[in-house]
Amino acid sequence: MVVAPLDVKRTDELRSLLATINRVPGMANPDNEIIPFGRLPDLHFARIVVLEDQTLDDITTAYGLPRRNYPLYLAFLADFDGDVDRFRNQMISIASKGLEQIFSFCTDFKPGMDIARWMKQHEHRPSTMYINWVGRTMQQIREENALRQVVQTFVFNSGPKFQTSAPEEIRRAIKGFVASQPLKLTPIGKMSLSWRIKNLAHLIFVPIILLFLTPLIVLYLPFFAFQLRRREKSDMEIAPRPTAEYVNKLARIEDYDVTNQFTAMGSLKPGLFRRWLLIYLLWLIEYTTRHVYTRGHLARVPSIHFARWVFIDNKQRLVFCSNYDGSLESYMDDFINKVAFGLNVVFSNGIGYPTTNWLFFQGAKDEQKFKYFIRRHELPTEVWYDGHTGLTNFDLKRNTLIRSGLEQQSMTNAEAKQWLQLL
Amino acid sequence: MSNEVDYDDVQGLVRFAFGKLDGACFYLVRIKDAGAARSWLASARVTSARTLSPPPETALQVGFTVDGLRKLGVPDDAITGFAPEFVAGMAEESRARRLGDVGDNAPVKWSWGWSDQTPHLVIMMYSKKDALAQCEAEFKGPSWDTAFQELERLGTDDLGDVEPFGFVDGISQPTIDWDGKRKIKGDQFVYSNIVSLGEFLLGYSNEYNEYTDRPLLDPTSKGAAELLPALDQPQKKDLGRNGTYLVMRQLVQNVRGFWQFADAAAHSNPDERNRLAEAMLGRKLDGSPLLPLQNQPIDGVGPDKEDLAYNQFTFGTDPVGDRCPLGSHVRRANPRNADFPNPVTGMISHFIQLLGFGRKGLRDDLMSPTRFHRLVRRGREYGPGVSPEQALQPPQPGEGENGLHFICINSNIARQFEFVQGAWLTSTKFDGLSEESDPMLGDRAAVAGCPEPNTFSRPRDSGLRERCSGLPQFVTVRGGAYFFLPSLRALRYFATIGS
């Protein structure tokens, strides 16, 4: 995520420029002239958002501390396949003028600068990154979707001829047909060697570090419990209903696609306790997203494509960005009814979050306050690009299963029936 | 302070469908003269939810849109306490997109509910069919024409137990926990048809064990003294308590189109035609479910024998829709699931599933728990009525349209009505399906990157779906609005506050 301070006086001008990228409010035209996202074949999602924190006065309301006047930032982020340097260069090669035009609104960017270097300097790495299906590339998504369409057309145009056949017979007929088609199915690549080494090291070393930390953690636990409970009992909730005008700003750019974007930000509660707790928890969650939740669901939630938690301003503020299937109401339903504990442990370290009970409990379960809190911290995403419009995580998973079933040599009739149910 | 519901303060429609009163009409009016409207409201004999013996011969119910409340001079600080979706209104642009009100359903094409055709009030009158005219005259009284300008008089017709397509209707309703017996502690592992009172009446605790937001007034503010206190904040007066939201949509049903489509798809085989239609709805024409009843009882279903025969089932035994297709109307409207997709057998199994492990089916966790998305339906049909057999013939010249005045009651419009409508009924991705919307009432507009949702599919023995494609849109929205259905105390408040 590239984060750079904006020239505050020119924000409106920037917003009007960004609006010209969009096909409908908030959603980028893939062929727009400023950044033609559609020409980046490895790009899943991208967004450009002005990080205009609506909640900077909360620290005064809740803790009597002076408002911190952070710079107003522009954030640019993308979810793509492969190496970041390669992606950045590819993007610059097709959109250097447009990027320059946008970044010129940042206080420390001058036209003619080395864009790649500037972007790199402003890169903020996420503390936690979630990917619905680690390793599934855009190429794979495109090829598998084309495969499904070909198979479905074949099956549903073949009329009654399949009605009496055994499932495995049908599967084989489909397999034969697909083999005769000019379809490209690139073998699913392995992640790069350096990625795999890093990932393996992460897999091993985090538990080792944890193991070493355990005695300290155990010793600290009673104090921790005391510190936590004291804060939970006194921290103020700030969750008034957001104004209709603000909600409308957010809602007017939603639901043009089966997938939606979500960007939110807020300040951490003051003090080292919350800061270290959040750093520690995001570090643990990152472990689960890298090694446990890599195949289609984050805990119980199947609807999130990509999500990231990024610290900014010397870890005084946190930005959360995600791409999810369905509308916001169903996203919040997932939050509250399926992973309330997961939201609580992270976001209860932010100012004003609905009161939690022992870190895991209550919090998001206070439905209405939680929804207000979320909407109030959410930001209108000026530009959002979806590289596979119309496809949900479930669609992508089904396409992958269709492909893998087709690649099998043989199946029992029961297996073949399950496979046919995917079509 | 007593938690008991004062039935005298609740409008009767929340508790009763007035089924014995087979005549009904709904006036959508705008206020011409606020003073006259106030006095009409002050003297209106609005029917309460108290059980009367003998039951009343007539009933009167009154709901308000936000425009109506403003017109009556309800102060802004009270109005801003109502649900944001109520204040914004049904026809708001981004909301229309979510509700499937696009294309032919778009608010700009509505005959009411949009722009200056937005009603201020809905005034609902019920009586025996042949006494309706007299009942209307009595309820209207002498000041009606001074007070109101009629936008529409929505008439209804009693088609017996069936809705216009010919299916037995209104047989599945949540059982409201009027007595506050339902105690919710954490996750619910079994589907229950008993739903917290707070889901249908403001001022009481809901399925989250919380109180839905509503206007709470300072006791010293004008008119507030007469209101009940808020149960969760006794220092405040609760303008919402014993009131709720009423969603109304006029749905035109193309009955001939529906049956003629089914007939063509079934190659004019009458049995197959009915089977297809029943699969689309997810119940048989006589209302019985497509899957066998289960042995273990469901809380809130029964003891009435008919209710047991209609409703003692869930879809747990039918994960791929072999008996009742996944995309059928009733599965979309009420998936009958609990908080977890698989049975929870103890603390460990609870914990494992909470972390997202122990998944069994492809579709696990695609669905939200049903209990947060229930509606009490109070709709009435209209039109001459066409039987499925007649529907296969060309229309009679000058034949009137058939349809449904869809009416439902809920205390959180966004989480209940809008969620059911947007995330379930008209969603083109419901339960992992694609290219489908609700076969009966869905719109057929394609979402970006998706094919038109004009397909309906049923599983076959081989595993391959049987795809019925080219479904036209059978239901068109003709109008709609969100109303607040106040308590009788709040009604008196509205009738006096602006004067």
Image (cartoon, coloured by chain):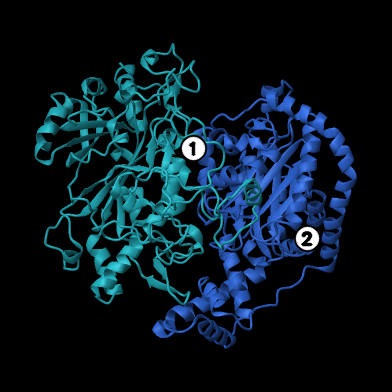
Give left or right: position of B237 versus A380. left
| Residue A174 position within the rendered picture, expressed as x and y whole percent measured from the top left | 53, 83
At a point 19% along the width and 31% down the height, the residue shown is: B55
Q: Residue B219 bears which disc, if any? A: none
The residue positioned farthest toward the top in the image shown: B220
Q: Callout 1: residue from which chain?
A: B
Q: Residue A84 bears which disc, if any? A: 2
The residue positioned farthest toward the front in the image shown: B295
Shade of chain B as shown in the rendered figure: cyan
Determine if marks 1 and 2 fall on one subunit: no
Q: Classify mark 1: residues with Cα within 10 Å, few (<14), some (14-19) or many (20+).
A: many
Vertical side of A95 occupied by B92: above or below: above
Number of the front mark, 1 or 2: 1
| Residue A193 position within the rendered picture, expressed as x and y whole percent measured from the top left | 84, 68
Residue B138 in sight from this viewpoint: yes
Q: Which of the 4 image quadrants contains residue A108?
A: top right
Q: Which of the 4 image quadrants contains residue A80?
A: bottom right
Q: Callout 2: residue from which chain?
A: A
Q: Nearer the viewer, residue A57 or B133?
A: B133
At a point 82% along the width and 50% down the height, the residue shown is: A121
Q: Which of the 4 image quadrants contains residue B278?
A: bottom left
At a point 41% along the width and 35% down the height, the residue shown is: B411
Chain letter for the blue colouring in the rendering: A
Secondary element under disc 1, as helix, strand or loop, is loop
Q: Which residue is mark 1?
A: B207
Vertical side of A141 occupied by A48: above or below: above
Q: Classify mark 2: residues with Cα within 10 Å, few (<14), some (14-19) or many (20+).
A: few
Q: Nearer the viewer, residue A114 or B180?
A: B180
